[in-house]
Amino acid sequence: MKFFSKSTSGFYDSEIHSNNRSANVLEITDDQHAELMATQAIGKFIQADEGGFPVAVDPNPEPVEKIRERTPVEIRAQRAPMLDTLAGIAGRVVRKDDRVTADAADNASDALLDITTLPPFLAAETYDDMKAAILARYRKIVASAPD
């Protein structure tokens, strides 16, 4: 038999925890236990409902302020190799006297440096919206590159 404890938010198995269970346990079926474990594996949390029975719930969404703090840092880390590559390209094409490609590399670098200050990014309320704003800007940068 399987049990769930509201006070510990833990599961107990009678074969393992014969006498070492929390006092407020409720019996659940093996199927219920398996279903809860499956939902936990995909990111849900298990907590007790009003009656003390376990239920799977979505995690609390991260506050937009926290997302706004961490996302620019992630984006800057992701763009660093792109900026390095563009600097290398610009250096090579300047030596070959190809001002068109050098200017395009400089423009792309400038656009990448400004990417976390653009209005669509700053107005985004979720991480997915922020990512979408950044991806849209990446697409625009790539589209402006010479053939």
Image (cartoon, grey):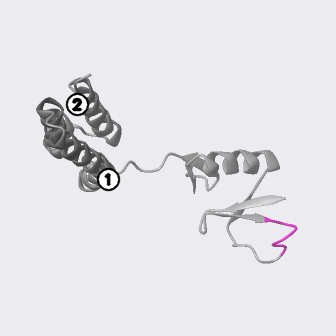
As drawn, the label of residue 141 is 2
| Local crowd size for mark 2, using a 10 Å CA cut-off: few (<14), some (14–19), many (≥20) | some
Residue type, numbered disc 2: Ile
User: Quick check: can you spot residue 122?
Assistant: no
Residue 131 position within the rendered picture, expressed as x and y whole percent measured from the top left:
32, 38
Could you tell me which secondary element the residue under label 2 belongs to?
helix
The C terminus lies in which quarter of the figure?
top left
- The x and y percentages for residue 59 are 47, 50
**On screen, 87 above or below 143?**
below
Is residue 14 part of the magenta span, yes or no? yes
Front-most of residues 143 and 16: 143
Q: Which residues are magenta?
A: 13-18
| 93 inside magenta stretch | no
Compared to residue 61, the image places residue 133 above or below, namely above
Label 1: which secondary element: helix
On residue 74, the disc is 1
Amino acid residing under circle 1: Glu
Q: Residue at x 28, y 39 (%)?
A: 130
Of callouts 2 and 1, the N-terminal one: 1
Q: Is residue 76 left or right of residue 128?
A: left
Q: Residues within 10 Å of mark 1 (few under 14, many from 20)?
A: few
